[in-house]
Amino acid sequence: MDAANTPRTIDFPANPITKKEYRGNNVELLTNVTVSNKYPTNEWAGYRQWASIGRQVMKGQKATYLISVAGAEDGGRKKFRKVKVFNLAQTCEAAPVGVEVEETAAA
């Protein structure tokens, strides 16, 4: 079997900043988005999380929305909120503050 016909293995969706794997319906959602967009990795994080490690979400990229549940572990009332995440492939290294990035023409 050649490389073009070899099935691609997708890792379990995880957040590289918190080191936690996603759970519930978010696993299926993120895996489907990873496959359909042909992202090379299944690493997902929020905008500010990527910025905290020196990565910038590229202009024009669309977030994937997840559902986060809070309050379920302590027996309290469950609270649901919408969370935006971006795949690692939707980011690039951020330029240091105050540094002009010079664009070069393709040769």
Image (cartoon, rainbow, N blue to C red):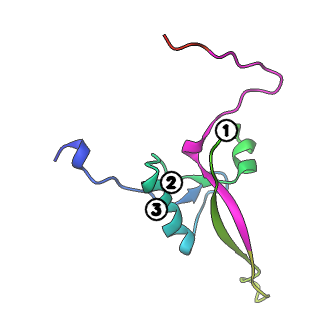
Residue 81: x, y in percent?
74, 72
Describe residue 79's horizontal placement relative to residue 41 as left or right. Answer: right
Locate residue 88: give its quadrant: top right
Vertical placement of 33 versus 100: above or below? below
Q: Residues within 10 Å of mark 3 (few under 14, many from 20)?
A: few
Tell me the tag on residue 68: none
Residue 53: x, y in percent?
70, 41
Three-letter code for the amino acid on which mark 1 is drawn: Lys
What residue is disc 2 on?
42
What residue is disc 3 on?
32
Stretch of the chain drawn in magenta: 81-103
Q: Secondary structure at mark 1?
A: loop
Could you tell which of marks 2 and 1 lies nearer the N-terminus? 2
Q: Are marks 3 and 2 in contact (CB under 8 Å)?
A: no
Which numbered disc, 3 or 2, marks the residue closer to the eye?
3
Locate residue 9: give its quadrant: bottom left
Residue 99 visible, this orientation: yes
Residue 29: x, y in percent?
52, 66
Count of marks, rendered view:
3
Vertical placement of 33 versus 68: above or below? above
